[in-house]
Image (cartoon, rainbow, N blue to C red):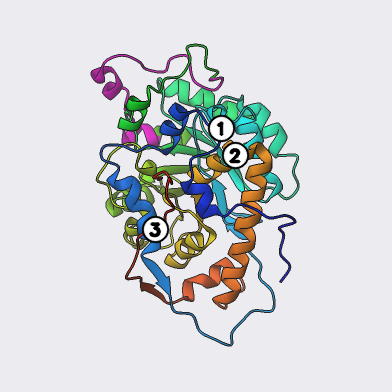
C-alpha cells in the first residue's frame, strides 16, 4: 500500500485536544466550548471510543480504494469538513485556506452561511482542484423564505453541489466557556453570506422565525440542487424525511454539543436513524470524530460518509492551510491502513466488520489538554 504523507503530520488525536498555539483564548472558548455542562460534547467522543472491532485474519486486500459515492457522484474520500462559522478567528487564511487544503487532499467541504469569505471565492478556488471532494453550502434559515431562496440560488450559481439545511438550531446562545472568556465578534466582523434580514432581538422574535416542516417542503420543491438535512437524531424524523421526500440525504448530528446539552452522542443515535431510513437516503454523521479509526467505525455502522469539525479548525489554527493539508494526509494514511488491517478493500466493505463494545472508553489526555467536542 502506498502512503501519501510526505512529512511528519500531527496526530489527529493531539490536534483535537490540545489548545491551538497562538489562538486567542476567547476564540478557543468559542470553538471548543459546548452547551450547558458539556455532557453531550464529551459524550460524542467517548461514544466512538466505546466501539471496537473483532477482525478476521488472513484476509488482507491487495489494494485499498477509499473512494465513495455520495448523491450519485463518485468522490475520492468518504469525509467532508463540517460547516463551521467564523474560521477567520482561528487563522487569517480562514475558510478559503481550509477549503483549498481540504480539496487538494480529496476531502469534501461544507461552507457555513456564517463564513467570513464570500461563497463565490471559496467555490472558485475549490472547483479548480481536479481531485477534490464534494462542495456543499450550509444554509442557516435566517430571515424569511425569500432570503433562503436567494442565498440558495447564489450558491447554485457559484457551483455548489448541494444545500445543507441546518434543522436543529432554531436559536443559540453563548456557552459558559464563551461567557467566561468574554467572547464577542467585533462590530465590523465580515459575514458576506449572511442575509441582511437575519433576525435579531427577543426570544419571541427568534422563535417566530424558526424553521418548520412546511418550510422544508417549500424549499425542497423549489431547489434544483440536492437538499441535505443536518441535525437529525430521532428515527421518526428520519422516517418522515424519507416518507415525504423532504431531502436527498440527512446528517445525524447534535451540532457538536453546542446547542442543547443532554442529547445522545451521534454514534449512539446513528443505528436507529439508519434503521428508519432503511437505505432510502444517504446518511452521514458528525460529532466527536477525532481520528480516522472513528470514521471507519461510523462507516462500519452503516453511515455513507462523515463530517469532521473541531480537528480541522485546530489544524487550521496551528498552521493555516498547510496544517489542514497535513492533517488530512495523516487521516487518509491512517484510514487506508485501518481498512487494510480489517481486511477491507473499500469503505463499503467495512459494513461486514464485527464491532464489539470496549470496556474502557475514556479518551487518553495529557496534562493541559482542553476538552473538546
| Vertical position of residue 359 compared to residue 231: above or below | below
Query: Does residue 86 lie above or below 196 as drawn?
Result: below
- For numbered disc 3, what is the local secondary structure? loop
Name the residue rendered at 54%, 39% in the picture. 313
- How far across and how far down the image is residue 280, in percent? 43, 58
Q: Seen in the image, is 264 located left or right of residue 13? A: left
**Pointers 3 and 2 in contact (CB under 8 A)?**
no
Q: CA distance from mark 1 to mark 2?
A: 7 Å
Please, what secondary structure does the residue beneath circle 2 have? helix
Say which label, 1 or 2, has the lower sequence index: 1
Number of other residues with Cα within 10 Å of mark 2, as a class: few under 14, some 14 to 19, many 20 or more: many
The mark nearer the N terminus, 3 or 1, is 1
From which residue to which does the magenta span run? 191-217
Q: Reply yes or no: does residue 156 show up in magenta.
A: no
Within-10-Å neighbours for mark 3: few <14, some 14–19, many 20+ = some
Residue under numbered circle 3:
363
| Identity of the residue drawn at 50% across and 54% down | 13
Q: Are marks 1 and 2 in contact (CB under 8 Å)?
A: yes
Q: From the top left corner, tell me how far across and down residue 306 is, in percent.
A: 50, 53
Q: Nearer the viewer, residue 340 or 321?
A: 321
Residue sitting at 48 percent across and 63 percent down? 299
> Which residue, given by chain and number where applicable, does mark 1 sit on?
22
**Residue 305 x/y as whole percent:** 51, 56
- The quarter holding residue 364 reads bottom left
> CB of mark 3 within 8 Å of CB of mark 1?
no
Amino acid at each position: 500500500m502506498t502512503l501519501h504523507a510526505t512529512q511528519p503530520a500531527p496526530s489527529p488525536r493531539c490536534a483535537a485536544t490540545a489548545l491551538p498555539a497562538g489562538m486567542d483564548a476567547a476564540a478557543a472558548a468559542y470553538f471548543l466550548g459546548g452547551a450547558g455542562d458539556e455532557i453531550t460534547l464529551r459524550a460524542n467522543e467517548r461514544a466512538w471510543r466505546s466501539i471496537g472491532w473483532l477482525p478476521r485474519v488472513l484476509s488482507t486486500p491487495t489494494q485499498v480504494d477509499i473512494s465513495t459515492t455520495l448523491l450519485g457522484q463518485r468522490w475520492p474520500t468518504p469525509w467532508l469538513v463540517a460547516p463551521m462559522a467564523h474560521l477567520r478567528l482561528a487563522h487569517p487564511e480562514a475558510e478559503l485556506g481550509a477549503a483549498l487544503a481540504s480539496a487538494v487532499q480529496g476531502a469534501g467541504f461544507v461552507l457555513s452561511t456564517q463564513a467570513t469569505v464570500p461563497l463565490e471565492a471559496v467555490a472558485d478556488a475549490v472547483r479548480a482542484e481536479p481531485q477534490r471532494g464534494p462542495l456543499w453550502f450550509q444554509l442557516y434559515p435566517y430571515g424569511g423564505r425569500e432570503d433562503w431562496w436567494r442565498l440558495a440560488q447564489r450558491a447554485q450559481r457559484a457551483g455548489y453541489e448541494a444545500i445543507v439545511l441546518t434543522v436543529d438550531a432554531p436559536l443559540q446562545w453563548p456557552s459558559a466557556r464563551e461567557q467566561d472568556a468574554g467572547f464577542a465578534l467585533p462590530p465590523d466582523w465580515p459575514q458576506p453570506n449572511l442575509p441582511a434580514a437575519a433576525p435579531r432581538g427577543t426570544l419571541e422574535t427568534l422563535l417566530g422565525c424558526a424553521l418548520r416542516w412546511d418550510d422544508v417542503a417549500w424549499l425542497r420543491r423549489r431547489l434544483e440542487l440536492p437538499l441535505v438535512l443536518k441535525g437529525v437524531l430521532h428515527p421518526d424524523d428520519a422516517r418522515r424525511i424519507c416518507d415525504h421526500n423532504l431531502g436527498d440525504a440527512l446528517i445525524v448530528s447534535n451540532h457538536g454539543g453546542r446547542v442543547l446539552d443532554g442529547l445522545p452522542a451521534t454514534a449512539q443515535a446513528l443505528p436507529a436513524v439508519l434503521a428508519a431510513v432503511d437505505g432510502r437516503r444517504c446518511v452521514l454523521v458528525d460529532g466527536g470524530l477525532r481520528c480516522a479509526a472513528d470514521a471507519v467505525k461510523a462507516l462500519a455502522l452503516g453511515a455513507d460518509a462523515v463530517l469532521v469539525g473541531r480537528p480541522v479548525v485546530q489544524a487550521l489554527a496551528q498552521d493555516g492551510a498547510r496544517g489542514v493539508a497535513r492533517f488530512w494526509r495523516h487521516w487518509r494514511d491512517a484510514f487506508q491502513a485501518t481498512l487494510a488491517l480489517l481486511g477491507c478493500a473499500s469503505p463499503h466493505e467495512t459494513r461486514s466488520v464485527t464491532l464489539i463494545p470496549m470496556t474502557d472508553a475514556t479518551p487518553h489526555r495529557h496534562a493541559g489538554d482542553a476538552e473538546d467536542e
